[in-house]
């Protein structure tokens, strides 16, 4: 070892290490420790307004209505607890079962035909190249039109004495029909109103699902010799099953909640033939029988939920 290297080694061992400079990373470490807590609580703070509104206007009214269904209350005074008497009265009432039957008949007259019509119209709209936006808006206009105005138009069109429909029937030598005043024609007339009002909304749902289908599937099917009808049945309809299931559940809810159409057009008549489940529920409210109305609403929820779950189950089984 040379003298120079020995001197340098001795200096390293003798001289104390240089004093550490004050580091500026200490406050950064504190920030890193507190930042994860802010990130954890920030999403809850953003969601908190929605949760409060949901609890105040959805959860609390739901439990209040459930408790009210076990009482006898007419809007004033103290509610008297009567247990299951409201449910027993409804389950043994012919009016309750008649309203469910009327809603079921309207469902059979509207929803199956609406699903088929929506698929056909959506396929045609998807194939149109010119004025596609105009036709889509034309189908949506009835859905956004106020329901009371549509019902009033239906009264004018289907009036027995001065209606435009009976005028056209008389022009070809046919007798007038009591569309809204006879039990046999009142339900089909309301079903036609429901079809005209809500089919455009279902068309939009089906059209959005139709545009998600890969066009390569149709090209491969055409190369295999499949025609348009075959492609519709083997490609379009199976791949639209989820959109149709969603529309089916929504329209089932709409039919069993139908209120404005029979209320404005027929007042539930003739002979309660158009008193739907929604209108029957409204009749309890007009009589201030709020306990029975609350029980009726929960029974209606159970029925609609059971029907909707049945449809979902069947479609999943097909998948």
Image (spheres, grey):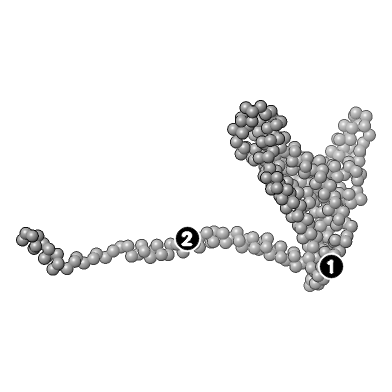
Which quadrant: the C terminus? top right
Instruction: Give residue 192's position: percent from left, percent from top.
Output: 81, 41
285 horizontally vs 249: left or right: right
In this rendering, is residue 107 above or below 71?
Answer: above
Q: Quadrant of residue 247?
A: top right
The x and y percentages for residue 109 are 82, 43
Residue at position x 64%, y 63% from top? 55
Q: Earlier in the sequence, mark 2 or mark 1?
A: 2
214 horizontally vs 254: left or right: left
Label 2 Cα neighbours within 10 Å, binned few <14 / some 14-19 / many ≥20: few
Q: Residues within 10 Å of mark 1 (few under 14, many from 20)?
A: some
Left or right of 287 in this view: 67? left
Q: Is residue 99 left or right of residue 211?
A: right
Q: Is residue 203 above or below residue 13?
A: above
Q: Secondary structure at mark 2?
A: helix
Disc ID at residue 39: 2
Q: Secondary structure at mark 1?
A: helix
The residue lying at 21 percent from left, 67 percent from top is 19
Residue at image coords 11%, 62%: 8
Vertical position of residue 319 compared to residue 166: above or below:
below
Residue 145 location (% of width, % of height): 73, 43
Residue 78 or 2: which is nearer the viewer? Answer: 2
Q: Which residue is mark 1?
A: 85
Q: Name the quarter where the N terminus is drawn.
A: bottom left
Residue 285 percent location from the top left of the image: 81, 60
Mark identifier at residue 59: none
User: Visible in this render: residue 137?
Assistant: no
Q: Is residue 299 visible?
A: yes
Q: CA distance from mark 2 to mark 1?
A: 52 Å
């Amino acid at each position: 070892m040379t003298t120079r290297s020995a001197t340098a080694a001795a200096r390293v061992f003798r001289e104390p290490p240089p004093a550490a400079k004050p580091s500026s990373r200490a406050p950064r470490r504190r920030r890193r420790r507190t930042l994860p807590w802010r990130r954890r609580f920030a999403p809850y703070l953003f969601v908190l307004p929605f949760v409060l509104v949901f609890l105040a206007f959805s959860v609390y009214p739901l439990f209040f209505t459930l408790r009210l269904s076990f009482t006898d209350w007419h809007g004033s005074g103290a509610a008297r607890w009567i247990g299951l008497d409201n449910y027993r009265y409804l389950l043994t009432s012919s009016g309750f079962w008649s309203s469910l039957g009327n809603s079921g008949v309207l469902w059979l007259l509207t929803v199956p035909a609406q699903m088929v019509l929506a698929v056909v119209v959506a396929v045609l709209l998807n194939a149109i190249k010119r004025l596609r936006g105009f036709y889509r808006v034309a189908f949506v206009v009835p859905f956004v039109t106020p329901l009371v105005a549509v019902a009033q138009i239906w009264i004018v069109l289907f009036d027995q004495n001065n209606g435009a429909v009976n005028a056209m029937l008389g022009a070809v030598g046919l007798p007038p029909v009591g569309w809204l005043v006879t039990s046999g024609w009142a339900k089909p007339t309301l079903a036609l109103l429901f079809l005209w009002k809500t089919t455009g909304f279902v068309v939009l749902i089906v059209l959005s699902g139709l545009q998600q289908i890969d066009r390569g599937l149709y090209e491969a099917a055409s190369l295999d010799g499949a025609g348009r009808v075959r492609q519709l049945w083997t490609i379009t309809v199976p791949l639209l099953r989820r959109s149709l299931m969603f529309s089916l559940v929504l329209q089932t809810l709409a039919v069993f909640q139908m209120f404005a159409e029979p209320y404005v057009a027929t007042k539930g008549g003739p002979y309660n033939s158009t008193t739907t489940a929604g209108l029957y529920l409204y009749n309890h409210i007009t009589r201030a029988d709020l306990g029975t109305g609350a029980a009726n609403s929960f029974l209606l929820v159970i029925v609609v939920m059971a029907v909707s779950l049945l449809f979902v189950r069947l479609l999943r089984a097909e998948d």
